[in-house]
Amino acid sequence: MNNYPIFIDGTWRKTKESLQVLDKYSQKVYATVSTAGKKDVDDAISSAFHAFKRHQLSPYERFSILQKTYQILLDRKEELAKIIVKEAGKPLKQALAEIERSAQTFLLAAEEAKRVHGEGVPVDAAPGSENRLAFTIKVPVGVVGAISPFNFPLNLVSHKVAPALAAGNAVVLKPASKTPISALKLAGILEEAGLPEGLLQVVVGSGSTVGKQMIEDKRISLYTFTGSADVGLKLKQETGLNRLILELGNNSPVIVDKEADLDHAAQTLAGQSFAFAGQVCISVQRIYVHESVHSSFMKKIISNIKRLSVGDPADPATDVGPMISESEAERAEEWVQEAVSDGAEIAYGGKRDGVLFEPTLLTNVNKNMRVVCEEIFAPVVSIIPYTELDECIAELNQSDYGLQGGIFTQNIDTAFYAAKRVGVGGFMINDGSQYRVDLMPYGGVKDSGNGKEGPKYSVDEMTEERLIVMNLK
Ligand SMILES: NC(=O)c1ccc[n+]([C@@H]2O[C@H](COP(=O)([O-])OP(=O)(O)OC[C@H]3O[C@@H](n4cnc5c(N)ncnc54)[C@H](O)[C@@H]3O)[C@@H](O)[C@H]2O)c1
Ligand SMILES: O=C[C@H](O)CS(=O)(=O)O
C-alpha cells in the first residue's frame, strides 16, 4: 500500500502522523498520507512566503511551466483517473473527463499568464492634473491559501493553483482529507514541469487543525475556499479583513417550460442529476415542470434514469457510483425518508445499499422539505409542478443558494424572461444547471458564495491593481 508524503519547501516530507484514504467503493484502506502538524504548516507558509519574494518568474516562465503541466496531465490521464476512481469513488468515465478538464484549466491559466495587465487612467482629465500620466499594473497578492473539497479533487484544486501561479503568487494548498492524493500527484507534476521550490506547498490534514492554522496566519494574503456554506460562513467570520473567495453549495433549480423539447430535457436532466452520485455543487436538485407537460416529462425522465448503470466506479460502463462515505449515504436516506413521512412519493429509486444510493426521483414534495430547501448533495432529485412562470420563479428564488440554474423552452422570450429574474450566478437555456466549461466565469450569489472562478477571473481576483501616477514637466 502506498504511503504518501506531503510537499513542503520543495521536498517530500513524511511526518509522524498519517491518515487513511479509503477506496470509496470497497471501503478498504487504499493508501495512507502523512498529515501536517503545527510545525509542518508553519514551515509550508514560511517557505511560500519566502519563495514568493525569491522567485519573481516572468510571465513567459509562468506560461511555460503551466503549459508543460497541461501536457503532463494529458500524458498521465489514465493513471490519474484511476486514483480519482479509488479515492473519490468517481465513475471512470467521469474521472477521465475531470483530468481532461484539469488539463484545460492549466492551459487556460498558462494563456492568462501572458495577459496580466492594468489599464491607462486619464488623470490628465482632472482640472490641475493636465501634466500627469497614469496607469495601473496588476501585481500578485503574495501567498494564496487554497482549501478544496472532495468532489473534484483535481480540477477544483487546479482552479485554485493554476491561476494563482499564473498571477505570480505562491500557494499553500490544503486538499480535502478524504481525497488528498490527486493534489499530491499534481504537486509532483508541477515540480516536473519546472515550478521552483516553495511556490506550491501541499499540507494534508483536517479543517479544524491544518485549515484553522492556515486561516489564522497573517502571512497568507488571500484565501480561496471551495466547500460547504457552513464552513464558508465560519471562514468568513474568521478571516476578518483578509481577502476571501468563497465557492459554496447550491440546490440547483431547472425549469421545464410547456414549450420545452421534453426528450432533450429528460435526457439531459437524468444525466445532470445523478453524475458523481449527485455530489456536484451544480447537480440538478429541483426540477420545476409546467403542469401541462408534467406526466409526459415524468415518463420520459424515468425511462432515461432506468438506463443509468449503478455500481463499481472502476467499470467503464458505470454512471452512478458510491457516495463519498456510508454516513453521507445514510444522511441522504434519512432526508428522503423524512420527506416521504411528510407526504413525498418516490417515483423511482430510494434504496441504499451501503455506500451506493439509487438514483432517486421524488414527487409530491413541498418547499419546506430538506430534500428541496437544503443542498442534498446526493443522487436525489425532486419534481415540482407549476402553473404560472412568475410563481415558479418566485418559489425557486426562495432558496438561500444561487449558484447556477436553467430552463428548457423553445420560446426565446420565456427563456430571457426567466434569465433576468432568477437569482443565480449562471443560467443555462436549454441545458441543466450542471453545464460548466472551465473558461467561463463561475460563482454564485447569496449563500453560494462570492467571487468568480475560471482562470481569467481568478487571475483578476488573485492580483492587486496598483496605480502609478507620473508628474511630468
Ligand atoms: N461552488 C463550488 O464551486 C463548489 C464546488 C465543489 C463543491 N462545493 C461544495 O462543497 C461541499 C462538499 O464538499 P466538502 O464536503 O469537501 O466540503 P467541506 O466544507 O466539508 O470541506 C471543504 C474543505 O474545507 C476544509 N475545512 C473544513 N472545516 C474547516 C475549517 N474550520 N477551517 C478551514 N478549513 C476547513 C475541509 O477539510 C475541506 O478541505 C458541498 O456543499 C458543495 O456544494 C462547491
Ligand atoms: O462541484 C462543483 C464543481 O464546481 C462542479 S465542476 O467541477 O465545475 O463541474
Image (cartoon, helix red, strand yellow):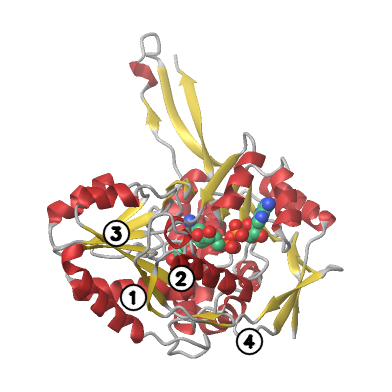
Mark sitting earlier along the chain (1/3):
1
Number of disc labels? 4
Judge by depth and name the residue closer to the eye, 77 or 281: 281
Q: Taking 161 as reference, is 383 left or right?
A: left
Q: Position of residue 353 (x, y in %)?
A: 55, 84
Mark sitting earlier along the chain (2/1):
1
| Identity, as a three-letter code, of the amino acid under mark 3 | Gly
Residue in the picture at 87% in, 68% down? 16
Outermost top residue? 128
Q: Give SS at disc 1.
A: helix
Quarter, ligand 1 = bottom right
In space, the residues marked 1 and 3 are separated at their CA atoms by 14 Å
Q: Is residue 262 visible?
A: yes
Q: Specify the quadrant of the image occupied by residue 274.
A: bottom left
Mark sitting earlier along the chain (3/2):
2
Judge by depth and name the residue closer to the eye, 79 or 288: 288
The residue that disc 3 covers is 406
Q: Taking 211 as reference, is 111 left or right?
A: left
| Identity, as a three-letter code, of the amino acid under mark 1 | Ala
Judge by depth and name the residue closer to the eye, 220 or 28: 28
The residue that disc 2 covers is 278
Above or below, 129 relative to 172 = above
Q: Give SS at disc 3.
A: strand
The residue that disc 4 covers is 26
- Mark 3 within 8 Å of ligand 2, using the beta carbon: no
